[in-house]
Image: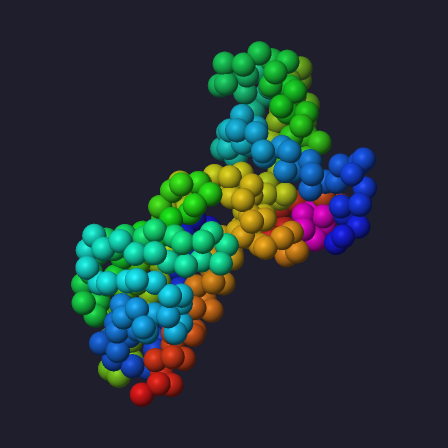
Amino acid sequence: MVTLYSSPAKPTQLDRVLKAVGDPTRRQILDLLAEQDLPVGRIAQKFKMSRPAVIKHLQILHSAKLVNVRPDGRERIQSLNAAPLQAADAWLARFESFWESSLSKLKHQIEHTP
Amino acid sequence: MKSIKKEILINAPASKVWEHITDPAKIATWFTPMDFAPKVGHHFTLNSKCGGGLSCVVQEVVPQRKLVYTFPIADFKIDTLVTFTLEQSGAATKLTLLHTGFDQLTAAQMAEVAPKYDGGWGTYLPQLQAQAAEPTLATAKA
């Protein structure tokens, strides 16, 4: 694990994911793509942003592998790749295991004390 | 998964289970020390390992049947709801715990704070790395 921190010159995949989700506009783009795949132009419309500005955000999302691209005629369709975001599930799963262990302690406490 | 639901069958009457979820001395034995009182509107502080004291408020109290209180998620300044429901049948009581309100958060937001709750990257870092390395497994659940 430690070795991950010893090469600051080259960003790791995790660094890219964190950089990508660290920006509110990019999080909104991810939320938008969670609903449907969209071409660049439609994303730009939704955000009232210039096309180059959207492309810049998308490039960061691509490098984090959070968004995939496929060509469709002259358009480039952007789609969400949620796998790196399974960290979110991990977060909720922590609450879940917290409650699980608390409740089993509760059961034990009640059933084994007079 | 936008809410958490847990059910557990306890071999005791609902009155005894109720005591354990509402009496501060008893709560401390299975949960965490907190200045709880089963009164609607009561403010209490729950000690958490990661976020210090969490300010909660009792929302609903139906003795031996239902208890609801707020549970703040400090990182996002939002409140979630924790509901305990008790149903006695015979000598046993079914306790259902429902933790709701996570739908206020997006997946990206949750991913952003996940590491803090992990006490480090330990648990899911290997997962992220594996996913990064194996894009074909992208949709597989870990």
Q: Residue furthest top?
A: A50
Q: Quadrant of residue B96?
A: bottom left
What's the coloring here?
Answer: rainbow
Magenta stretch contains residue B116: no
Q: Position of residue B130 (x, y in %)?
A: 72, 50
Against B78, residue A51 (above or below) is above
Q: Residue furthest bottom?
A: A114
Against B54, residue B62 (above or below) is below
Question: Which residue is found at the position 76% from the left and 47% from the top?
Answer: A4
Q: Is residue A36 visible?
A: no
Nearer to me, A73 or B9: B9
Q: Is residue B40 visible?
A: yes
Q: Which residues are magenta?
A: B124-131
Q: Position of residue A15 (x, y in %)?
A: 69, 38
Q: Position of residue B23 (x, y in %)?
A: 27, 70
Left or right: B43 in relation to A95? left
Nearer to me, A8 or A44: A8
The quarter in which the C terminus of chain B is drawn is: bottom right
Q: Position of residue B37 (x, y in %)?
A: 24, 63
How many marks overall?
0
Question: Which residue is found at the position 58% from the left and 33% from the top?
Answer: A22
Determine the main secondary structure of the stretch shown in magenta. helix
Nearer to me, A82 or B23: B23
Magenta stretch contains residue B130: yes
Question: Which residue is found at the position 19% from the left and 55% from the top?
Answer: B40
Against B106, residue B117 (above or below) is below
